[in-house]
Image (cartoon, helix red, strand yellow):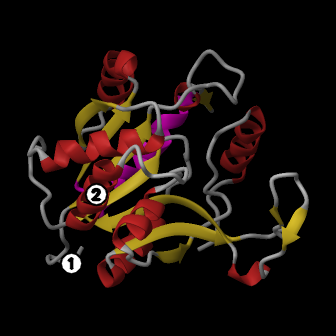
Amino acid sequence: MDVKKKRCTAVVLAAGSGKRMNSAVPKQFLMLEGRPVLWYSLQAVEQSDIIDDCILVTGAEDIGYVRREIVERYGFRKVDAITAGGGERYESVYEALRVISCGKMTVPNEDGYVFIHDGARPFLTEQLLKDTYREACRHGACVAAVPVKDTIKIADENGFAVQTPARSLVWAVQTPQVFETQLILQAYQKLYEQLPHVKQEITDDAMVVDAMLGIPVKLVRSSYQNIKITTPEDMRTAEGFLAQGPSEEG
């Protein structure tokens, strides 16, 4: 790697539940070809030349299990901190950012980059980490995404289609979402200063950066294989992807 590469910290979010999986076991802990779903993203982080360390966010009640049965069992040495998340995704991200801002990392990351990734997305690749790092260096903020394949309709409150955006302009956003450290810290600090008066639903980090700072976020072409495990159908799809081997998509 370039000796000038700045420090890169991965925030891996693993505080979700198994509600939509109809499972008592949180989706990130379900077994996928003999390993927990979470293992796959942590393994990509562990082997990456881009990522230097990792903050793992999980449920408060799962911290001991995650440390013992995943981090220690599989030898994930880049996991520098395990912290409890919140009830919403943005709360979990904020808790991870507090680890950085409060100086709790073994090696500080004050002027590097933060890669925020869903622990339930098992198909993170080194190429995607390289691509998002490159664009984050150029633009300060970027997200993995893919162009949508279907025609999208905007509905009104009664469920009637009222608008059809040009498909060429519509992308499905994924993770990782990558930001300059100080930029994402500033965006989340401003968000928390405005809560609970923020009226729109906060669904991802790019939204926070755009809404709080007015900074445009670059879309980086990802792979359609970079799915998030949410439903039982997703598990079967993931098993199929593993069986067929690595994707050749960019």
Question: Which residue is nearer to you in this view: 165 or 232?
Answer: 165
Residue drawn at the location 30% of the way across and 23% of the way down: 67
Check the image and report above or below for 170 versus 125.
Answer: below
Residue drawn at the location 38% of the way across and 76% of the way down: 215
Residue type at numbered disc 2: Lys
Q: Earlier in the sequence, mark 2 or mark 1?
A: 1
**Residue 116 coordinates in the image, percent (x, y):** 39, 54
The residue beneath circle 1 is: 2
**Residue 213 coordinates in the image, percent (x, y):** 34, 70
Magenta span covers which residues? 34-52
Question: Which residue is nearer to you in this view: 210 or 10?
Answer: 210
Residue 181, quarter of picture: bottom left
Q: Is residue 86 left or right of residue 153?
A: left
Residue placed farthest to the right in the image?
A: 160
Check the image and report above or below for 32 versus 132.
Answer: above
The residue beneath circle 2 is: 190
Quadrant where the image shows the N terminus: bottom left
In this view of the protein, can residue 3 be seen by the observer? yes
Question: Which residue is nearer to you in this view: 2 or 55?
Answer: 55
For the residue carrying disc 2, how many other residues have a C-alpha within 10 Å: few (<14), some (14-19), or many (20+)?
some
Nearer the camera: disc 2 or disc 1: 2
In this view of the protein, can residue 55 be seen by the observer? no
Q: Which mark is residue 47?
A: none
Quadrant where the image shows the C terminus: bottom right
For the residues labelled 2 and 1, say whether their Cβ atoms are less than 8 Å apart: no
Label 1, secondary structure: give it: loop
Q: Is residue 95 left or right of residue 167?
A: left
Residue type at numbered disc 1: Asp
**Residue 205 coordinates in the image, percent (x, y):** 43, 58
